[in-house]
Image (spheres, helix red, strand yellow):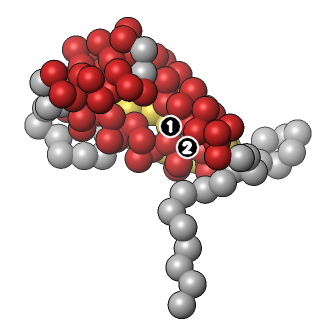
Amino acid sequence: MRKRKKGRKLHREKNQRRALLKSLVQNFIMKEKIQTTEAKAKEIQSLIEKSITSAKRKNLTARRQLLKNFHKNLVKKLMEEIAPRYEKTKGGYTRIIKLGRRKTDGAKMAIIELVK
């Protein structure tokens, strides 16, 4: 039986898709709230949650793994500002709020933000 592959393609090639998701996650970490399409928000939600869980470990290995993907300023913000807020939480750090459709092309829009 044919099984579906994990993740959305977002009408992009692999390297373009990776760059887009990395950029969205970085912007999310900087601003802690972004507005994007619903599909992109759902796709980056797991990446953000994994990054925060990794930052909660507060050791050198976790820091180096995060530095593979993000700039040192973002890693610092993740480990020193964002992760301590969720020390007692085991998951569910983000929330997706669905908005209406975009006027220009009718895409479903959403806001993804950190749960306070």
Q: Are marks 2 and 1 in contact (CB under 8 Å)?
A: yes
Q: What kind of residue is marked 1?
A: Ile
Q: In the depicted view, which residue is nearer to us: 112 or 49?
A: 49
Task: Give residue 102's mark.
Answer: none
The numbered disc on residue 112 is 1
Q: CA distance from mark 2 to mark 1?
A: 6 Å
- Which residue, given by chain and number where applicable, does mark 2 sit on? 41
Which mark's residue is nearer the viewer, 2 or 1? 2
Mark 1 surroundings: few (<14), some (14-19) or many (≥20) residues within 10 A: many
Note whether 51 is above or below 75 in the view shown: below
Q: Quadrant of the C terminus?
A: top left
What percent of the width, then of the height, locates residue 93? 31, 39
- In the rendered view, tell whether residue 72 sits above or below residue 69: above
Q: Residue shown at 62%/50% (left/top)?
A: 39
Q: Is residue 102 left or right of residue 44?
A: right
Quick check: 91 above or below 116?
below
- Whether residue 81 appears in this view of the structure is yes
Using the image as rendered, state which of residue 37 and residue 23 is in the foreground.
23
The image position of residue 53, as x and y in percent, is 24, 38
Give the image location of residue 25, x and y in percent. 49, 30
